Image: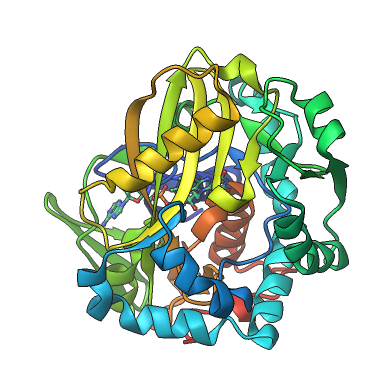
């Protein structure tokens, strides 16, 4: 039995803690924000096992000017942030060639194909079962031309094992009758599901882990010093020695990885949500609007409208234009919606090639990374936790981790 520190209490960190506790380790969880204090709080809640198409794909060369300049674009760039963003952006564009994007999509599909395995046993806990809604996600296209433009990516998904059912306008209306008849085509993804409350799910998971003996420290890891037989973890309250440390700090993982010899070009893709209280009955499943880059997910508190991408670092200032886009687009699709509450901003942790970092640090096998899960950290949290536990146990991992190495950049 080892004494393992997990840094970060999001989907990735708490899933890692779950797998480590399952292996019998003594786990200490560090997070100043508590369970689900980061991106894991406000996501769209979808288990998106179909999402193997990274944002960086060959269409960005054609579509980027439109996305950056159009008023109804779900992608915004804060121009003043461009100099800091440049290394990531160049890496992102380099990863958008057909060959590299296909490589990333294949690696993601390999993880996504196993993602359910990461949660299967965890979801037998009675305190978690009530959060799972087994309704397939529906992705909608408002014009036949944008649907047709997406056919190559749908075909790539299919070739990588994603099972999709294509719906015409009548079938979309029959499935979700409250929607305005704006949508020419839909894609329904087999095996996907969603959570009714991602934050409450993680709080319940943390409570269960604490009941099994996990320690929680509401403090930030400031420094990591790998040593021959362990790792010294420094916080504002002092230092502690652990046999292993798992770095699962989402978009904040870059500085910790640098202390362990790995300079990863991690950036935040900022995303937003709005909540429409009492409106969750309007759709029966997560409904995504492809051209507008967001999902409407029925949750316990109401209908959550979540998505968009802003490249602007990790400051707290919200982009009112993107919040307005979420509001008026969702009200257009569902005119019954009232006024939204609780605008939320979160930081998706994203590497330029769209792949997470999974595996051991360069400096020490005692430091294990699991971060950079971009738009699918809820989906891949369970499997990433399994990888962390395999690395700590020294168990052979039957996943090929080479594409996810911290040294690939
Ligand atoms: C709008 C939006 C919609 C999304 N929708 C989906 C979806 O439907 N499906 C899906 O799969 N994914 C979705 N995502 C992505 C998903 O939310 C993220 O990929 C995921 O939450 C990342 O989880 P994480 O545990 O790596 O990071 P986080 O949830 O960000 O957790 C990291 C934690 O580390 C802590 N931390 C940071 N620094 C330190 C430190 N030094 N010491 C200790 N703790 C530290 C933070 O406080 C935080 O709690 C969405 C994201 C957004 C923004």
Is 282 on the left or on the right of 144, as rendered?
A: left
Residue at the spot x=67%, y=65% of the render? 53
Residue 315 screen position, x and y as percent: 21, 55
Residue at the spot x=67%, y=42% of the render? 119
The answer to whether residue 27 shows anywhere in this view is yes
Residue at the spot x=51%, y=53% of the render? 1
Foreground residue, 363 or 88?
Answer: 88
Is residue 225 positioned above or below 178 on the image? below
Residue 63 screen position, x and y as percent: 55, 71
Q: How is the image coloured?
A: rainbow
Foreground residue, 111 or 347?
Answer: 347
Is residue 163 positioned above or below 137 on the image? below
Residue 311 screen position, x and y as percent: 35, 64
Foreground residue, 151 or 223?
Answer: 151
Across the whole image, how many numbered discs are drawn on residues?
0
Q: Quarter of the image holding residue 272?
A: top left
The answer to whether residue 263 shows anywhere in this view is no
Q: Quarter of the image holding residue 362?
A: bottom left
Residue 177 screen position, x and y as percent: 75, 21
Residue at the spot x=85%, y=32% of the render? 170
């Amino acid at each position: 039995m080892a004494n393992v520190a997990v840094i970060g209490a999001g989907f990735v960190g708490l899933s890692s803690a779950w797998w480590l506790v399952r292996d019998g380790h003594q786990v200490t969880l560090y997070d100043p924000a508590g369970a689900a204090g980061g991106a894991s709080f406000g996501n769209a809640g979808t288990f998106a096992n179909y999402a193997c198409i990274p944002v960086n794909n060959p269409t960005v060369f054609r579509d980027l000017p439109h996305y950056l300049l159009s008023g109804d674009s779900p992608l915004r760039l804060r121009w003043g942030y461009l100099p800091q963003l440049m290394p990531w952006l160049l890496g992102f564009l380099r990863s958008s060639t057909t060959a590299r994007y296909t490589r990333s999509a294949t690696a993601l599909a390999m993880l996504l194909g196993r993602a359910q395995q990461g949660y299967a046993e965890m979801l037998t806990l009675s305190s978690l079962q009530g959060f799972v809604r087994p309704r397939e996600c529906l992705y909608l296209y408002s014009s036949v031309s944008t649907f047709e433009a997406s056919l190559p990516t749908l075909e790539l998904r299919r070739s990588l094992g994603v099972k999709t059912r294509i719906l015409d306008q009548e079938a979309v209306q029959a499935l979700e009758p409250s929607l305005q008849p704006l949508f020419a085509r839909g894609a329904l993804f087999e095996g996907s599901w969603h959570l009714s409350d991602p934050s409450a799910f993680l709080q319940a998971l943390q409570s269960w882990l604490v009941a099994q003996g996990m320690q929680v420290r509401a403090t930030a890891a400031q420094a990591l010093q790998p040593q021959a037989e362990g790792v010294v973890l420094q916080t504002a309250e002092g230092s502690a020695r652990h046999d292993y440390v798992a770095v699962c700090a989402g978009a904040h993982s870059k500085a910790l990885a640098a202390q362990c010899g790995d300079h990863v070009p991690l950036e935040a893709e900022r995303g937003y949500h709005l909540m429409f209280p009492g409106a969750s009955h309007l759709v029966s499943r997560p409904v995504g609007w492809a051209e507008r880059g967001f999902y409407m997910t029925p949750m316990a508190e109401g209908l959550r409208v979540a998505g968009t991408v802003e490249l602007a670092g990790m400051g707290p200032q919200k982009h009112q234009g993107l919040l307005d886009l979420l509001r008026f687009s969702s009200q257009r699709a569902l005119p019954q919606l009232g006024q939204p509450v609780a605008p939320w901003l979160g930081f998706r942790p994203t590497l330029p090639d769209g792949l997470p970092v999974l595996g051991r640090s360069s400096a020490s096998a005692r430091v294990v990374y699991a971060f950079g899960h971009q738009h699918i950290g809820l989906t891949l949290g369970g499997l990433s936790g399994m990888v962390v536990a395999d690395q700590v146990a020294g168990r052979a991992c039957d996943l090929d981790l080479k594409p996810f190495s911290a040294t690939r950049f």
